[in-house]
């Protein structure tokens, strides 16, 4: 397990470095002796690069499975849940990167995956055994993971869009990340990802009410998780409405996405982080 851990960490770090080289290729091309330029020439094939990411994600998946089922039960402690969420974000990114122009988002998604892996292994928090739960609760969990993964990738796209917008506004478009796609392409990706994420988040809220009724006998419990999830849903929905009605785009859309995603993070991890990590 130690060897697999080391190999997975090395793959994560190496892929992050290669993505950095890839999106800075314009700067590297100014120097014929640049080591990063030579590396880019080797790994400019996106399928080879994404294959390395697949290997890193596979190692992450195996390590998470082994650590979460050591006792024979499924342990979704906070750290392991964060590891699972980060792995889902990486999976969503990979599916999108093979078919859409979002490969450069790896510069943000890969560090999240690495952080999730390390947290799950070395800072798991208080154990949380999940066994013999209703099917609708597992469905709720699966949809929640997928929704978070998609919105995480949308947030990464928003962050990259914000950086690109700042470059253009400062009249130094080649100062950082010169190889990014066009802003219009990134905006299209952002709103499509957000729309899909909102649809899944809506389904997640509905299945959450159904599972709450089956487990606790009431369909809606106003705790921090429900309230913050609903606020995040409102934030993403308002962004889509603002884009449709008022033409919101660029930095406004990026900021709105990042704020709504920050609320979603609090909804998923807020109280459990305090009780499982800080107080423990």
Image (cartoon, rainbow, N blue to C red):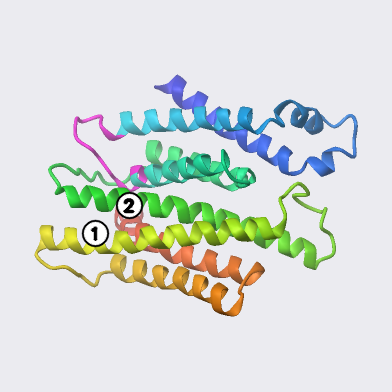
Left or right? Give the position of 135 relative to 233.
Answer: left
Left or right? Give the position of 273 relative to 215.
Answer: right
Residue 233 position by quadrant: bottom left
**Residue at x 46%, y 68% (from the top left corner):** 236
Q: Residue 280: x percent and y percent?
A: 30, 51
| The N terminus lies in quadrant | top left
**Residue at x 44%, y 50% (from the top left corner):** 149
Q: Residue 14: x percent and y percent?
A: 62, 31
Foreground of the two, 182 or 115:
182
Foreground of the two, 238 or 171:
238
CB atoms of marks 1 and 2 within 8 Å: yes
Stretch in magenta: 68-80
**Main SS class of the magenta portion in the image:** loop
Q: CA distance from mark 1 to mark 2?
A: 9 Å
Q: Which residue is mark 1?
A: 207
| Picture layout, residue 106 above or below residue 278 | above
Q: Residue 126: x percent and y percent?
A: 27, 46
Residue 127 position by quadrant: top left
Q: Which residue is mark 2?
A: 143
């Amino acid at each position: 397990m130690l060897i697999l851990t080391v190999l997975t960490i090395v793959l994560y770090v190496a892929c992050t470095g290669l993505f950095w080289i890839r999106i800075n290729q314009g700067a590297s091309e100014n120097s014929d002796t640049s080591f990063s330029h030579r590396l880019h020439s080797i790994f400019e094939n996106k399928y080879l690069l994404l294959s390395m990411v697949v290997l890193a994600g596979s190692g992450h998946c195996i390590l998470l499975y082994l650590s979460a089922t050591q006792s024979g039960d499924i342990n979704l402690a906070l750290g392991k849940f964060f590891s699972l969420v980060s792995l889902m974000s990486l999976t969503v990114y990979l599916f999108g990167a093979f078919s859409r122009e979002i490969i450069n988002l790896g510069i943000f998604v890969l560090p999240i995956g690495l952080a999730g892996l390390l947290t799950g292994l070395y800072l798991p928090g208080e154990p949380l055994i999940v066994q013999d739960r209703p099917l609708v609760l597992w469905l709720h969990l699966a949809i929640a993971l997928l929704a978070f993964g998609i919105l995480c990738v949308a947030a990464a796209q928003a962050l990259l869009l914000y950086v690109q917008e700042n470059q253009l506004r400062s009249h130094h478009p080649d100062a950082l990340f010169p190889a990014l796609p066009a802003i219009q392409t990134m905006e299209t990706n952002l709103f499509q990802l957000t729309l899909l994420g909102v649809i899944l988040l809506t389904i997640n809220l509905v299945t959450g009410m159904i599972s709450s009724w089956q487990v606790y006998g009431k369909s809606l419990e106003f705790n921090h998780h429900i309230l913050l999830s609903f606020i995040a849903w409102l934030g993403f929905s308002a962004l889509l409405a603002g884009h449709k009605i008022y033409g919101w785009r660029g930095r406004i859309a990026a900021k709105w996405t990042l704020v709504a995603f920050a609320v979603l993070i609090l909804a998923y991890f807020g109280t459990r982080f305090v009780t499982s990590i800080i107080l423990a």
